[in-house]
Amino acid sequence: MKKKTVAVFMAAAMTAALVSGCGGSDAAGSGEAVTEETAQETSGEEASGTETAEAEETAAAESGAEEGAVYKVGIVQYVDDASLNQIEAAIEAELDAKAAELGVTFDYSDYTYNGQADSTTLNQIATELIASEVDVIVPIATPTAMIMQNATADNQIPVVFSAVSDPVGAGLVASLDSPGSNITGTSDALNTEAVMDLMFAADPDIQKVGLLYNKSEDSSKAPIEEAKAYCEAKGVEVLEKTGTTNDEISLAADALIAGGVDAVFTPTDNTVMTAELAIYEKFIDAGVPHYTGADSFALNGAFLGFGVNYVDLGTATADMVVEILVDGADPADMAVVMLDNGIATVNTQTAEAIGLDYSVFEGMCAEVKETVTAEEFE
């Protein structure tokens, strides 16, 4: 609301300035010239306005959009964390852009919720969205998507998930190419081997790797097994510690440090992600780098986050929503979108604190980004 207020105020101020400028001394001294210029400008503005209107009508016609149509979009975020917040903001921004382009309205402001990692709350949200007769539900993160899938099994409201690491393993879709039901979406599947390669490139002498995750999160299961296999092939010892709450994750981090691990790996685990700000200093004090499956971990203090661009992921999710609502696409036939996974985000403050040189990462991944510790992305 504040942004809208500021925008209106600025527009009014600019209008006043323009009116004041038109009444200046130059206008009084050359009334005829000003009249001709004004007529030309007015004509140009009308032409420009006509062209813009025609472009919007063309875009709407090509997409099959009914001008003025209103679509109810339910957006359900699993929990507050930097990456998921990025995704939600990107979804909303893209829906707004598409609405302006197509001459329709995507009403999400009345149907956006946060489940705060509570399954009871998420089920209540699902019930509310169904009662509100939304046209589509957009769950962010695997646990949210699974609950929304169950809630729409009978009514078949389209579901477009975002940031689901293993859609097939979670039982959300029959296959990535042909989901087969009312649900599809975008995946942030993690390239575990690439993360482990970075870990051992930075320190080839690692003898023990800690695995920190929530064993009840489906998104963590496959990457953890992949990390175990990787370490086993190298003859490196593995120490696993898990937790389901911030306090348990904090105790698990203490146990890994006490167990003498040389590095810690966490996949795209939302439980650990929300606890990162509370544990990153433990790892820094122990000189243990934390390698993780999303950039928000690095933003919140971990040494490295690896994965997709979450703004791009959110944008792609919104585009799929538009295809379904406006173009009439069937989720059952829409392949799950897999983004390129290869961006390494390094927390430079943490790297300096533990004395780890990350220049070796150049050339090992698609991009190396730098960040410093904060709660949210700007």
Image: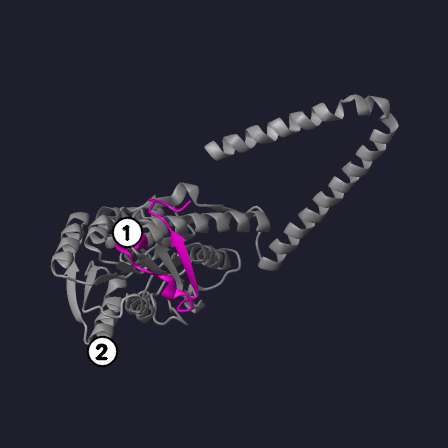
For mark 1, what is the residue?
353
Asked whether 80 or 185 is in front, the reply is 80
Tag count:
2
Q: Residue at x 22, y 46 (%)?
A: 278
Quadrant for residue 264, please give it: bottom left
Q: Position of residue 22 (x, y in %)?
A: 75, 26
- Name the N-terminal-most of marks 2 and 1: 2
For mark 2, what is the residue?
233
Q: Position of residue 139 (x, y in %)?
A: 35, 54
Q: Position of residue 123 (x, y in %)?
A: 26, 50
Asked whether 366 or 15 is in front, the reply is 366
232 w.r.t. 60: above or below: below
Q: Is residue 223 magenta?
A: no
Type of the residue with mark 2: Ala
**310 displayed left or right of 142:** right
Q: Is residue 93 visible?
A: yes
Mark 1: which secondary structure?
helix
Q: Position of residue 88 (x, y in %)?
A: 40, 49
Mark 2: which secondary structure?
helix
**36 displayed left or right of 341:** right
* Residue that lies at the very extreme toward the right in this rendered image: 32
Q: Is residue 182 visible?
A: no
**325 displayed left or right of 349:** right
Q: Is residue 360 magenta?
A: yes
Asked whether 71 or 42 is in front, the reply is 42
Q: In front of the other: label 2 or label 1?
A: 1
Q: Residue at x 33, y 63 (%)?
A: 165
203 w.r.t. 25: above or below: below
Looking at the rendering, the stretch of residues picked out in magenta corresponds to 351-378
Q: Residues within 10 Å of mark 1 (few under 14, many from 20)?
A: few
Type of the residue with mark 1: Ala
